[in-house]
């Protein structure tokens, strides 16, 4: 796939109304060039357009196993859409990072999908919270803390710099 990303006109109009540049709100899915929209941009769009959400319906809840599956409905004027947001270790853990908030992730996924459906963008644009490691170009895994040996070397170099000056 080339270096370009095809952004639907409808999405460009929404981003303009939100005063967001595409490079702030989107990134390109490497496999097919489709845009992936960041969660914050979808939340802003929902607030700007006054999308109303139902209370979520819990389909499955298991905090010990970090599983949350929710059903959410949203309305934009007379239009109504619903979707499922699922979060479980098999689809939220990335490399060595263990996602500690499956309920928040389930809610984000459900709402993001509903927003995309209400905006007629579902299938043309993906939500960042649906991406897995193989698809994502952004790594949410925090870097590991420096090893004790590296900390000691860093302190020694700082001390040498102080002595030189």
Image (spheres, rainbow, N blue to C red):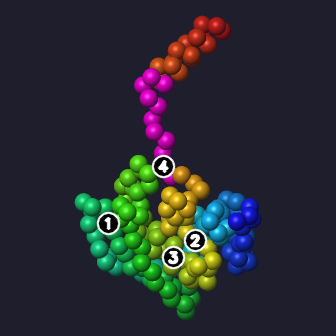
Q: CA distance from mark 1 to mark 2?
A: 22 Å
Q: Which mark is residue 141?
A: 4
Image location of residue 25, percent across then percent down = 64, 63
What residue does disc 3 label?
113
What residue does disc 1 label?
67
Q: How many marks overall?
A: 4
Q: Is residue 128 at all visible to an observer of this figure?
A: yes
Q: Quadrant of residue 47?
A: bottom right
Specify whether 134 is left or right of 9.
left
Q: CA distance from mark 1 to mark 3?
A: 19 Å
**Quick one: label 3, few (<14), some, or many (20+) residues within 10 Å?**
many
Q: Secondary structure at mark 2?
A: strand
**Quick one: label 4, few (<14), some, or many (20+) residues within 10 Å?**
some
* Mark 1 or mark 3: whose residue is earlier in sequence: 1
* Mark 3 or mark 4: whose residue is earlier in sequence: 3
Q: Is residue 26 at all visible to an observer of this figure?
A: no
Specify whether 1 is left or right of 134.
right
Residues in magenta?
140-150
Q: Secondary structure at mark 3?
A: helix
Image location of residue 100, percent across then percent down = 36, 55
Residue at the image point whose x is 41% and y is 64% from the top: 91
Q: Which mark is residue 126?
A: 2
């Amino acid at each position: 796939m080339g270096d370009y990303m095809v952004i639907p006109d409808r999405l460009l109009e929404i981003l303009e109304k939100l005063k967001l540049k595409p490079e702030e709100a989107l990134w390109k899915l490497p496999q097919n060039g489709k845009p992936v929209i960041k969660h914050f941009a979808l939340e802003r769009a929902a607030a700007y357009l006054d999308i109303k959400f139902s209370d979520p319906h819990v389909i499955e809840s298991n905090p010990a196993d970090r599983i949350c599956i929710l059903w959410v409905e949203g309305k934009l004027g007379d239009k109504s859409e619903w979707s499922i947001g699922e979060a479980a270790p098999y689809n939220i853990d990335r490399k060595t990072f263990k996602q500690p908030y499956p309920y928040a992730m389930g809610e984000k996924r459900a709402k993001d999908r509903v927003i995309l459906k209400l905006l007629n963008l579902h299938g043309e644009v993906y939500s960042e919270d649906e991406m897995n490691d193989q698809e994502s170009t952004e790594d949410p895994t925090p870097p590991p803390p420096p090893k004790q040996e590296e900390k000691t070397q860093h302190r020694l170099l700082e001390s040498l710099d102080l002595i030189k000056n």
